[in-house]
Image (cartoon, rainbow, N blue to C red):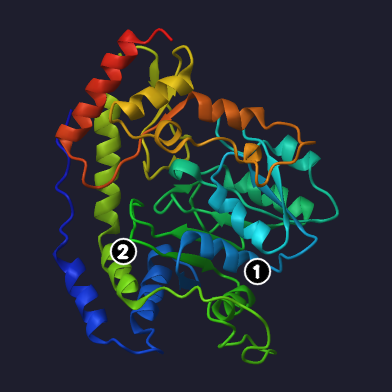
Amino acid sequence: MTDLPPLPATEGLGEDMLAALASMPDPTGAEFAARLEHDLTQAFTSRHALAVSSGTMALHVALSAAGIGPGDEVLVPALTVIMTVAPVVQLGATPVFIDSDPDTLDLDYADAGAKVTARTKAIIPVHLWGRMGDPTRLQAFAAEQGLTVIEDAAQAAGTSRAGITAGTAGAAGCFSLKDGKILWSGEGGFILTDDNHLAAHARAFRSHWLQPPPGSHPQERIALNGRLAEPLAALAQANLRRLPALLEHRRAQTTHLIHALEDTRGITPLQPSTNESWNHYAPLLRITLPNPRAFAEHLAQQGVPNSTGSFRLVPCDTRPMVTNRHRTPCRGAAQILDRTLALVLTEREGEAALDRYAAVISREAAAWTT
């Protein structure tokens, strides 16, 4: 087992934030956000990048720019969090939940195809835990059904598959900069798109329609304040310069932990696809012990943070605020969540913390009988 690489230096983070603070107060200030957007286009080879106040706002803005509104339906995997669904509902559209394949974690395209109607306008693939579905199959399905693809790539910065970077497979890719993401600024998000029209609409929508797209007038329509604060933009830009090192560090953390769990009873690692370059956002393990969800919850109580145990992640089609009593349950999504141990990491977990997690998991798995 190799040592972890050094944690990327943080000295420049405070300096950039102080520079942004020194320019305040400036109600029209957007210098640091503009710098961040420029660097994002270079890092992700995208024509446009738009900084916004959160990953949820990124989805809201992108969906609005794609023309989603009242009466529309949007396909959303049940294998996601409520933050993916909230913007759909807030725009007056209806989320239609689709299942996922337990073997691949990718969308169940047979289920998705069966749920397309004349009202279906878009699909939101979600790259949960940084894992990316087959982008070629996604693009072919969307083209066949006439759907706009808006990617929820909140956890997938740095992932790619078949040479396609997460967030660039559709009309727009939406990312989160929330503290805990590999690329972070405490709070924030951004949108990637190559579509000039979508970018112009999104730029107007995130700022009360003050910078209208061609053919429109300032404040001609109701929009939102979704701008990213200048100090947070400066912090995000500084972290973007560290992104290659941060990705290397996360991959090493995940590899270290998985190696430490070799031969652990009832625990096997989930491997990425052969053509997938995964950012290793969360170490993913299949639980084959009895009552696997209860085991994940037990680990959380023992100080091992994980998606289902710590955050009670359940299929989104079971959430009472968005569920439909006539729905067909998305059993594949439920199976994935019930049987997957997705550990929660930050860049600060060193070898000692990772080894402690591994020791607790191995000890508790050996004794688990429930």
- The answer to whether residue 261 is visible is no
At x 65%, y 69%, the residue is 64
Q: Which residue is mark 1?
A: 64
Could you tell whether 144 is left or right of 199 in the image?
right
Name the amino acid, label 1.
Ser
Identify the element where label 1 is drawn: helix
**Distance from the alpha carbon under mark 1 to that under mark 2:** 27 Å
- Using the rendered view, name the quadrant where residue 178 is placed: bottom left
Could you tell whether 359 is left or right of 223 in the image?
left
Pinpoint residue 115: horizontal percent, then vertical percent: 79, 42
Q: Return the residue nearer the eye: 36 or 187.
A: 187
Q: Return the residue nearer the eye: 325 or 122.
A: 325
Could you tell whether 93 is left or right of 42 in the image?
right
Can you say whether 341 is above or below 40 in the image?
A: above
Tag on residue 240? 2
| Image quarter of the C terminus | top left
